Image (cartoon, rainbow, N blue to C red):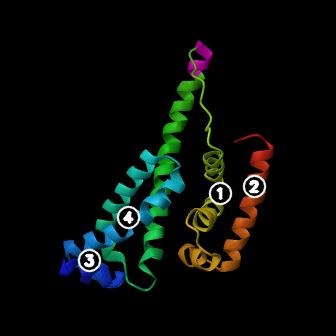
Amino acid sequence: MMALMTEERTPDAELARNAAGGDRESFSALVERHYGFIFRLAWRLTGHRADAEDLAQEVCARLGRAIRSYRGGAAFTTWLYAIVVNAARDAGRRAAREAAKADAWGAQALVDGHAAVEAEPEDPAEALWAAVRRLPAKQREAVTLVYGEGMNHADAAELMGCSEATVSWHVHEAKKRLRQIVAAGEV
């Protein structure tokens, strides 16, 4: 119990340094401390619980290999955010390749008369997040941090590695694009 209480007060940078040196307890404390953030961000970026769980597990595995690259110059969460977003982008590229294969199969099934009808999301909030996931990457990330994680623009800017004004611009552009998507009935 005493070790746990000490780890709760230990700064992320120190835990990361210890974990990079092979301390499994420090690594475990980091993962436990930040797993909720990893999962929430993964959920917002993927939109599906199973995908978010897979992505969170992938990030934890990547974290084990990448911890040695954390230099402590920025907040640990800023560095971790980049790992989650990069993992989501990698997963998105894999999914796009698989979707292209499925689309090719679907086109053939349509020609053959065997195509299945796709169900639409029933929850309006989920439909809106589905639309958010269709935004360009930086707009999607800004909206996810500001509205999904409840961050102010300054904190989101720190995580995204840009200015607060840039985050505000991305959110503004995202709102315009989302209005277009909704007006077009694409959600």
Say which mark, if any, is on residue 35: 4
Residue at 38%, 69% in the rendered image: 34
Segment tinted magenta in the rendering: 108-113
> What residue did someone put label 1 on?
136
Label 4 is placed on what type of residue? Tyr
Tell me where residue 75 sits by quadrant: bottom left
Of labels 1 and 2, earlier in sequence is 1
Tell me the distance, in whole angstroms, between the alpha carbons under discs 1 and 4.
26 Å
Left or right, residue 98 beside residue 184: left
In the displayed structure, would residue 14 be above or below residue 31? below
> Could you say where residue 112 lies in the image, as x and y percent from the top left?
58, 13
Of labels 1 and 3, earlier in sequence is 3
Tell me the distance, in whole angstroms, between the alpha carbons under discs 4 and 3.
18 Å
The quarter of the picture where the C terminus appears is top right
Of labels 4 and 3, earlier in sequence is 3
Of labels 3 and 2, earlier in sequence is 3
Label 1 is placed on what type of residue? Pro
Per the image, label 4 sits on a secondary structure element best described as helix
Of labels 1 and 4, earlier in sequence is 4
Is residue 152 one of those drawn in magenta? no
Farthest-out residue, front: 1
In the displayed structure, would residue 28 be above or below residue 89? below
Left or right, residue 173 beside residue 138: right
Tell me the distance, in whole angstroms, between the alpha carbons under discs 3 and 2.
42 Å
> What residue did someone put label 2 on?
177
Disc 4 to disc 3: CB gap under 8 Å:
no
In the displayed structure, would residue 40 be above or below residue 80? above
Label 3 is placed on what type of residue? Ala
> What residue did someone put label 3 on?
20
Tell me the distance, in whole angstroms, between the alpha carbons under discs 1 and 2.
10 Å
* Residue 48 visible in image: yes
Label 2 is placed on what type of residue? Arg
